[in-house]
Image (tube, rainbow, N blue to C red):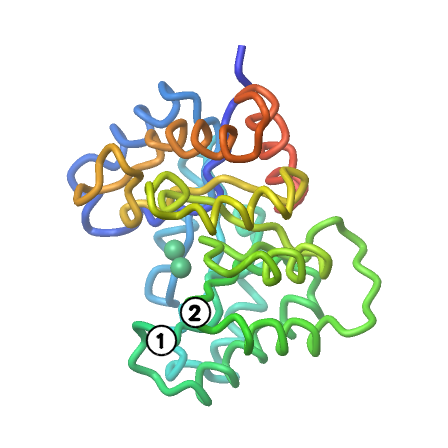
Amino acid sequence: MTDALFDTHAHLGDPQFAADRAETLERALAAGVARIIEIADSPEEWEAAVALSRARPALTRCALGLHPYYADHFSDELLERLKRKILLPEVVAVGEIGLDYVKASVGREQQRAAFERLLSFCRDYEKPAVIHCRGAYDDLREILARVYNERTPKRRFLGVIHCFSGNASDALFCRDLGFALGVDGPVTYPRNDALREALKGAGVGCLVLETDSPYLPPQSCRGQRNEPSKLPEIATRLALACGVGLDELAARTTRNALELFGL
Ligand SMILES: [Zn+2]
Ligand SMILES: [Zn+2]
């Protein structure tokens, strides 16, 4: 039997799940997804993410962060609030945080400043970072190297580059620094051979699965709402790309995710 899958990145607090959040969780379980990390993008979402995790402790934990879309909301006060929140048993990571040079309206300088402060916070408090990076891999590499410079990690993973979309060199760089790579819907898209090659090059030892629900639906349901029950399609395509069986891929990505989040 295939090992249970682990969806390391979902936004079930999104209004698109308002009408069927409980059913969505049941469908995930029925599809073989045994764990989900709920991601809160801004302080306005933190409470709901903690509540969801508290209601379903066997199934969900959460990460609290500040998406680069909202980097202009960064403040010392936000860091103080985060410092208190990460003591809660439901909160296993900080994120998502990062850089988005494609869609964010906040300027790059401001994004970099907020990201570096938040990443330093993860380092100092030894919390895994869930990192969003779109069109900004050069700056990401520079900031990761600077913040984690010469630190000997106590854990196998310092965090995850969620929805990894860099090239083969970026994949090796992030892996070698101690980051897992998050794989989601785009790995199933026919034209993404370069992405599949980059992931295969990095190896299953650093990969984790995610859906980023309700975003990034896999190929079979493009244009529709995504949800964690779609994770097997992503796992199946990734296993094929990496040349391993689905059972092995499921076992290894789940083990990576458990280590990443300290579960
Ligand atoms: Zn993201
Ligand atoms: Zn996300």
Q: Is residue 119 above or below residue 258?
A: below
Q: Amino acid at mark 1?
A: Tyr
Q: Quadrant of residue 25?
A: top left
* Residue 33 drawn at (x, y percent): 44, 27
Residue at 71%, 70% (x, y): give it.
124
Residue depicted at 46% across the width and 57% down the height: 165
SS type, badge 2: loop
On the image, the x and y values in percent for residue 123 come to 69, 68
In the image, is residue 83 above or below residue 183?
below
Mark 2, other Cα within 10 Å: few <14 / some 14–19 / many ≥20:
many
> What residue appears at the point 61 percent right and 23 percent down from the top-left corner?
248
Residue furthest top in the image: 1
Residue sitting nearer the eye, 128 or 202: 202
Q: Amino acid at mark 2?
A: Leu
Residue 262: quarter of image: top right
Answer yes or no: is residue 57 visible: no
Q: Which residue, given by chain and number where applicable, does mark 2 sit on?
A: 66
Report the residue at 40% width, 79% height from top. 71
Mark 1, residues whose alpha carbon is within 10 Å: few (<14), some, or many (≥20)? some
Residue 161 circle label: none
126 up-or-down from 99: above or below:
above
- Viewer-side residue, 250 vs 193: 193
Name the image quarter holding the N terminus.
Answer: top right
Tag of residue 70: 1
Label 1 with label 2: CB-CB less than 8 Å: yes
Mark 2 C-beta closer than 8 Å to ligand 1? no
Question: Is residue 90 shown to the viewer in this render?
Answer: yes
Q: 90 above or below 167?
A: above
As measured in the structure, the alpha-carbon distance from the residue carrying label 1 to the one carrying label 2 is 6 Å
Give how far across and how far down residue 159 sits, in percent.
62, 56
Q: Is residue 227 left or right of residue 72?
A: left
